């Protein structure tokens, strides 16, 4: 790039709308804050207070993990699949 060319302000790649809010954090965001592998107890220590988005509305991650039998997540994908098996997959509810 040349220093002679002025930088243009770029518009966002996706325009954000003024639609209804969605409560909770995406599961992928919560999973990305952790390093893998992880024991369930360590996930609860680090992210147990997080609220995640689910098709049935927001749920506390601690409640979701209490309902699963898995105690060790060898990789991020295992964690995500285990949580999604418990809460379901699909579009999330918006706040009304």
Image (spheres, rainbow, N blue to C red):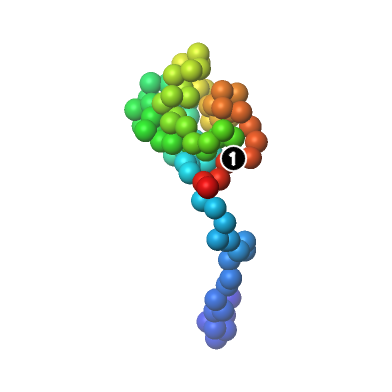
Q: Is residue 11 above or below residue 53?
A: below
Say which residue appears at 65% left-offset and 36% top-offset. Answer: 90
Towards the viewer: 31 or 35 = 31
- Between residue 5 and residue 25, name the one nearer to us: 25
Q: Is residue 59 left or right of residue 2?
A: left
> Looking at the picture, does residue 72 appear above or below residue 36?
above
Q: Position of residue 41 (x, y in %)?
A: 38, 21
Q: Position of residue 56 (x, y in %)?
A: 56, 33
Assign the N terminus to one quadrant of the image. Answer: bottom right
Q: Residue furthest front?
A: 96
x and y percentages locating residue 12 in the rendered image: 58, 66
> Which residue position is annotated with label 1?
92
- Residue 87 located left or right of residue 60: right
Q: Residue furthest bottom?
A: 4
Q: Position of residue 57 (x, y in %)?
A: 53, 36
Residue at 52% from the left image edge and 23% from the top image edge: 74
39 is higher (above) or lower (below) than 6 = above
**Mark 1 Cα-neighbour bin, 10 Å: few <14, some 14–19, many ≥20:** some
> Does residue 22 show up?
no
Q: Seen from this angle, which residue lies furthest right?
A: 90
Provide the secondary structure element on which disc 1 rests.
Answer: loop
Q: Nearer the viewer, residue 46 or 53?
A: 53
Please tell me whether residue 3 is drawn above or below residue 84 in the rendered image. Answer: below
């Amino acid at each position: 790039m040349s220093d002679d060319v002025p930088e243009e302000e770029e518009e966002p790649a996706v325009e954000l709308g003024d639609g209804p809010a969605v409560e909770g954090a995406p599961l992928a965001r919560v999973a990305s804050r952790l390093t893998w592998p992880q024991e369930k107890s360590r996930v609860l220590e680090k992210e147990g207070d997080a609220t995640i988005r689910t098709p049935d509305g927001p749920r506390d991650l601690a409640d979701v993990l209490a309902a699963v039998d898995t105690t060790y997540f060898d990789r991020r994908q295992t964690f995500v699949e285990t949580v999604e098996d418990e809460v379901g997959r699909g579009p999330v509810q918006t706040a009304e």
